[in-house]
């Protein structure tokens, strides 16, 4: 790949990824306004978020096959075109059903973009330069969703919700044109046999688990609802059958033999723990800020903005440090730092100052940037080239599933803590008691987050620098 100009390809990928990932968090703040304008209930409106996660969770496993069937250009331009059409449909949607269709088209484009991006970097850059390139992707993955709510708040202050889509549209079109000119093919399609049974099992398995966990906290009756536990059980059974089949067929949809490489396996476990820890704070802090401290949505978004921005901005720096010093120099101090921060999070209360929350969140996001991309790059570096599509698909799928499970798990613990506290007070409708119950529920959930951080520290000592296998 020495004759290929890498920078224009990397820029093409980053522009496309930025606006597709930005859209994940751009719309959520507009839900109250959309409920009134489109005349739908909160559980129905939540489908715009759940449906998005569901499509991404289902498509990412299939990407391992698609990456081998189509060229880099075809995959990227196809994904971005789908995303752009979805954005246009959302912008002109006359009612909720059309808006949901547009949203699902956007999700399909995003779900295919992420694995294409990572796979392209693995093919394009030698192992000793991958850290910096992956760091650039880390910048986009953290930076885009971080500015989403704040940007959305600014737009909605002066314009109607349709502008959330109209403003993205020209950038999405520019991304397609830029990629059309500069994006070169970096892989040759091998067109492996399509295993339809695996595709069905993967869709039902990952789809059922992501949907079940995502909808457990969305007004469906929680875990007592057959709709929630039923889909998780069906998903788990389908996933088990999917794993068995992948180990038996000659050309698996997602080659789980990648787990024979110890650093890749360690990466997968670390990634699940990191996503769970990240989602514990990302989902719990807004409840604490708004439910216990009485802050507005916009104010709580602003407190969490600096940490997320810093995480994105230092991802390229940690990538370069990874190339120079290897994973242990970043991951061991990063996990120890995270452990300390999570301990401080277990000590917060309704009396904790906003500055303290701001500092803790910034420190936590810095720690995560020291762990996430270096760990991921190190694990993928150990894989032989034929496993690249499978490795990226496995890690991206685990992120989606861990994210859905993490949100449900931590909100479940928080709600349980709230209910126990309110059951033992004389007046459970007193606003002061409700605020206190939220603080106690969040505290309980953070104790589990601290437990995950302890496991991350222990695992970090097993991390070793990997050498790429070339067969």
Image: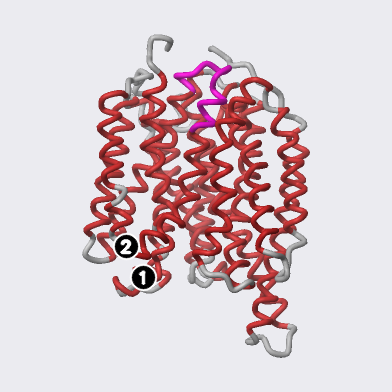
Left or right of 92 in this view: 256: right
- Mark 2 is surrounded, within 10 Å at the Cα level, by few (under 14), some (14 to 19) or many (20 or more) other residues, namely many
Stretch in magenta: 122-136
Q: Secondary structure at mark 2?
A: loop
Q: Position of residue 45 (x, y in %)?
A: 38, 66
The residue positioned 72% from the left and 28% from the top of the image is 328
Q: Earlier in the sequence, mark 2 or mark 1?
A: 1
- Quarter-wise, where is residue 291 in the image? bottom right
Q: How many marks?
A: 2
- Quarter-wise, where is residue 269 in the image? top right
Q: Position of residue 24 (x, y in %)?
A: 42, 51
Q: Main secondary structure of the magenta part?
A: helix
The residue positioned 71% from the left and 76% from the top of the image is 420
- In this rendering, is residue 352 above or below 269? below
Is label 2 in contact with label 1 (beta carbons under 8 Å)? yes
- Mark 1 is surrounded, within 10 Å at the Cα level, by few (under 14), some (14 to 19) or many (20 or more) other residues, namely few
The residue positioned 69% from the left and 81% from the top of the image is 422
- In this rendering, is residue 7 above or below 354? above
Residue sitting nearer the eye, 11 or 105: 11
The residue positioned 43% from the left and 37% from the top of the image is 114
Q: Which mark, by number, is residue 33?
A: 1
Left or right of 410 in this view: 250: left
Q: Which residue is mark 2?
A: 161
Q: Position of residue 441 (x, y in %)?
A: 69, 69
């Amino acid at each position: 790949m020495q004759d290929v100009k890498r920078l224009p390809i990397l820029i093409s990928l980053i522009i496309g990824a930025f606006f597709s990932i930005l859209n994940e968090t751009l719309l959520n703040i507009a839900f109250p306004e959309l409920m009134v304008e489109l005349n739908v209930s909160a559980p129905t409106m939540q489908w715009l978020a759940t449906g998005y996660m569901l499509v991404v969770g289902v498509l990412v496993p299939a990407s391992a096959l698609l990456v081998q069937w189509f060229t880099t250009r075809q995959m990227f331009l196809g994904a971005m075109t789908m995303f752009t059409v979805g954005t246009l449909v959302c912008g002109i949607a006359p009612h909720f059903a059309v808006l949901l269709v547009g949203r699902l088209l956007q999700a399909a484009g995003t779900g295919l973009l992420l694995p294409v991006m990572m796979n392209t970097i693995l093919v394009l850059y030698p192992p000793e330069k991958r850290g910096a390139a992956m760091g650039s992707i880390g910048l986009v993955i953290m930076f885009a969703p971080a500015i989403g709510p704040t940007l959305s708040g600014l737009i909605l202050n002066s314009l109607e919700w349709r502008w959330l889509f109209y403003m993205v549209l020209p950038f999405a079109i520019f991304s397609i044109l830029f990629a059309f000119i500069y994006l070169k093919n970096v892989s040759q399609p091998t067109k492996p046999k399509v295993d339809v049974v695996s595709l069905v099992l993967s869709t039902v398995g990952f789809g059922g688990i992501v949907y079940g966990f995502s909808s457990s906290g969305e007004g469906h009756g929680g875990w007592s609802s057959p709709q929630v536990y039923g889909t998780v059980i069906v998903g788990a059974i389908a996933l088990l059958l999917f794993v068995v089949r992948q180990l038996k067929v000659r050309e698996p949809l997602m080659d789980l033999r990648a787990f024979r490489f110890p650093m890749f396996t360690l990466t997968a476990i670390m990634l699940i723990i990191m996503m769970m820890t990240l989602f514990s704070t990302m989902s719990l802090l807004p409840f604490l800020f708004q439910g216990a401290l009485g802050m507005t949505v916009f104010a709580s978004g602003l407190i969490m903005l600096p940490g997320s921005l810093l995480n994105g901005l230092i991802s390229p720096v940690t990538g370069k440090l990874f190339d120079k010093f290897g994973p242990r120099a970043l991951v061991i101090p990063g996990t120890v730092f995270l452990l300390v921060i999570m301990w401080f999070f277990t000590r917060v209360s309704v009396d904790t100052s906003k500055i303290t929350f701001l500092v803790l969140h910034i420190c936590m996001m810095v720690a995560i940037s020291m762990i996430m991309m270096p760990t991921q790059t190190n694990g993928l570096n150990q894989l032989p080239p034929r496993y690249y599509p499978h490795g990226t698909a496995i890690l991206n799928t685990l992120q989606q599933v861990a994210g859905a499970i993490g949100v449900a798990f931590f909100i479940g613990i928080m709600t349980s803590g709230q209910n126990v506290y309110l059951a033992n007070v004389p007046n459970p409708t007193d606003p002061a008691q409700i605020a206190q119950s939220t603080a106690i529920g969040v505290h309980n959930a953070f104790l589990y987050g601290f437990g995950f951080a302890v496991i991350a520290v222990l695992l970090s000592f097993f991390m070793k620098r990997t050498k790429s296998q070339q067969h």
